[in-house]
Amino acid sequence: MDIYEKLQEAGLTGNEAKAYLELLKKGELSANQIAKNIGMDRTLAYTVLNHLIEKGQVNYVVKANKKAFSCSNPENLLNPIKSKETLILDLIQELSKVKTEKHEPVEINVYEGREGMRALVNIALKEKEMLSFGGTGRAYDLLYEMPAIAKKLEKTKYVLKVLLGKQYAGHEFSKYKNVKVKLVDIKSEATTTIFGDYISIHLIKDKPIVMIIKNKDIAQSYRNYFNYMWKKAGK
């Protein structure tokens, strides 16, 4: 790659590179002299020189009412690159501010039958608390192992808070010490449960259906919703 091609790579057009090199070789020249030396139309030569002036690569002085053009310091060829670097660095900072936060992935599993409830219970037991609204007590009745699990949890610090429909008041599961129940005047066949980064929605009728969703943001949103309803429910 010769010097002419390198100047074009540095950001000059072909005609600008020709005029720039001519000025660099000869020193100070008029537009007419440049046009003649490189075989360029005089009007085009003026246009090219004005572009070079705008780019900071050429300057001029007026002598006897005529412009005499000369090259600026060759280091000025770096100016566009430095300007772009400054612009891009500023842009990176701005983009970092508006960059979309990384969202937690959402994992959803849907089960049918008792095994779905067992999957729910097994995950929930790894947490420290379970919050439930729309509770019916049917999950406790569905799995034969639930009484034994409940007795075992009673000896731990595990907490179960339930917003229970009034029609299910006095259910057996509510007798355990670590189970806190508030009665609400809402009829609901489906139960929503929050534990850790999970929420589950289950319906236990003819054939149990259980949906378990894993997502930290969704779980926290439902937890906030539950806590609000828990306070509103009174004693």
Image: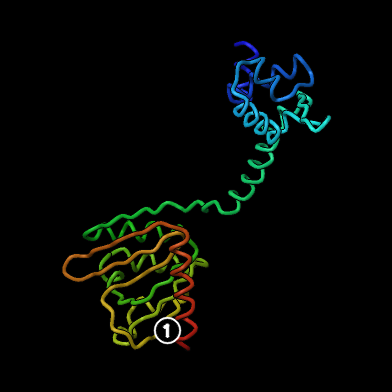
| Picture colour scheme | rainbow
Looking at the image, which is closer to me, 16 or 130?
A: 16
Q: Farthest residue toward the top?
A: 2
Tag 1: Cα neighbours inside 10 Å, few (<14), some, or many (≥20)?
some
Q: Give the vertical position of 184 relative to 225 (above or below).
A: below
Question: Which structural element holds mark 1?
Answer: strand
Q: Farthest residue toward the front?
A: 64
The amino acid on which the numbered mark 1 sits, given as a three-letter code, is Lys
Q: Farthest residue toward the left?
A: 206
Give the residue displayed 33% in from the left and 76% down from the top.
135
Q: Give the vertical position of 101 relative to 3 (above or below).
A: below
Could you say where residue 6 lies in the image, as x and y percent from the top left? 63, 17
Q: Is residue 5 left or right of residue 67?
A: left
Q: Give the vertical position of 59 relative to 7 (above or below).
A: below
Could you say where residue 171 lies in the image, as x and y percent from the top left? 32, 81
Residue 3: quarter of image: top right
Could you say where residue 107 lies in the image, as x and y percent from the top left? 37, 53
Give the residue displayed 83% in from the left and 30% down from the top.
64
The image quadrant where one finds the N terminus is top right
Looking at the image, which is closer to me, 50 or 234?
A: 50
Give the residue displayed 28% in from the left and 62% down from the top.
210
User: Exactly how many numbered labels are in the figure?
Assistant: 1
Q: Is residue 135 left or right of residue 8?
A: left
**Mark 1, residue position:** 182
Q: Give the vertical position of 166 relative to 98 (above or below).
A: below
Residue 125: quarter of image: bottom left
Looking at the image, which is closer to me, 139 or 48?
A: 48
Q: Is residue 177 left or right of residue 13?
A: left
Could you say where residue 128 lies in the image, as x and y percent from the top left? 50, 63
